[in-house]
Image: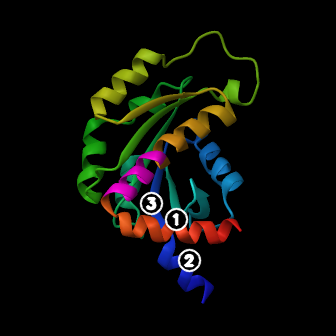
Amino acid sequence: MASKVLKEFSYSINLGLVGTDDSKKIIFLDYLKEIALKFASEDLIWEFFFLFNGIPIKLKAILAESFEDLISKKIPFKKFDAIIIAANIYNDKSINNINIENYTKFSQRFMFDGISVLAGIDPFLILKKKTPNERRINEFSLIQKTRELELLYCFKIQNLQRDVIDVFDKILNDIHFKLEFLNPELFERAKAYGRSLSK
């Protein structure tokens, strides 16, 4: 009975996390684990359940090295609601491998029109280690890539807590706004269920 209620009242989100191994994209999963009421993983797909502004959300996330991986893998997602592209700012290959052709193929394959984020990650600062003298990817390069792919948002991740929270606040606030105004009846039911979980 409880699982039926959960399924009926939680809002589902599919998230893609794209980036090379050294991009530290795992930090986004670590944050979701922190805020989740429960989570599980199977076959590279993570599932989280948490409350955001009182709304119960079930988020499924899949990790991939590139958009080609997402296209070629047999994944159970028919669509994606959000994509985070993680780029290590000390490895120019981590951003050069993300090109308009592959992103377009991905968008067409999944009819993607969701929330898109480019996150330039400083792995040394987030681990509180001494940084090398020169970054390979500067702010201008990140902004240029964001415009080239016509992504919605661009972030620089230097602080594990503050910056990762900012990324998810932006994504989840957009989804919260969309749910509230496009489906107010479901929004109210979800809110009511969220209140029952908070008691």
Q: Is residue 65 visible?
A: no
The vertical placement of 15 against 90, above or below, is below
Q: Quadrant of residue 140?
A: top left
Eye-nearest disc, 3 or 1: 1
* Mark 3 element type: strand
Distance, label 2 to label 1, CA atoms, is 12 Å
Q: Quadrant of residue 42?
A: bottom right
x then y, percent, for residue 53: 56, 53
Q: Residue at x 60, y 63 (%)?
A: 48
Q: Residue at x 33, y 55 (%)?
A: 181
Q: Quadrant of the C terminus?
A: bottom right
* Mark 2 element type: helix
The vertical placement of 65 against 10, above or below, is above
Q: Please give the range of residues in magenta.
A: 173-181
Under mark 1, the amino acid is Lys
Q: Residue at x 35, y 36 (%)?
A: 152
Extreme residue in the top direction: 133
Q: Which mark is residue 14?
A: 3
Q: Nearer the viewer, residue 76 or 38?
A: 38
Under mark 2, the amino acid is Leu
Q: Nearer the viewer, residue 78 or 131?
A: 78
x then y, percent, for residue 24: 61, 39
Distance, label 3 to label 1, CA atoms, is 20 Å
The vertical placement of 24 against 60, above or below, is above
Q: Quadrant of residue 70?
A: bottom left
Distance, label 3 to label 2, CA atoms, is 17 Å
Residue to which mark 2 is pinned: 6
Closer to the N terminus: mark 3 or mark 1? 3
Residue to which mark 1 is pinned: 191
Q: Is residue 118 visible?
A: yes
Mark 2 surroundings: few (<14), some (14-19) or many (≥20) residues within 10 A: some
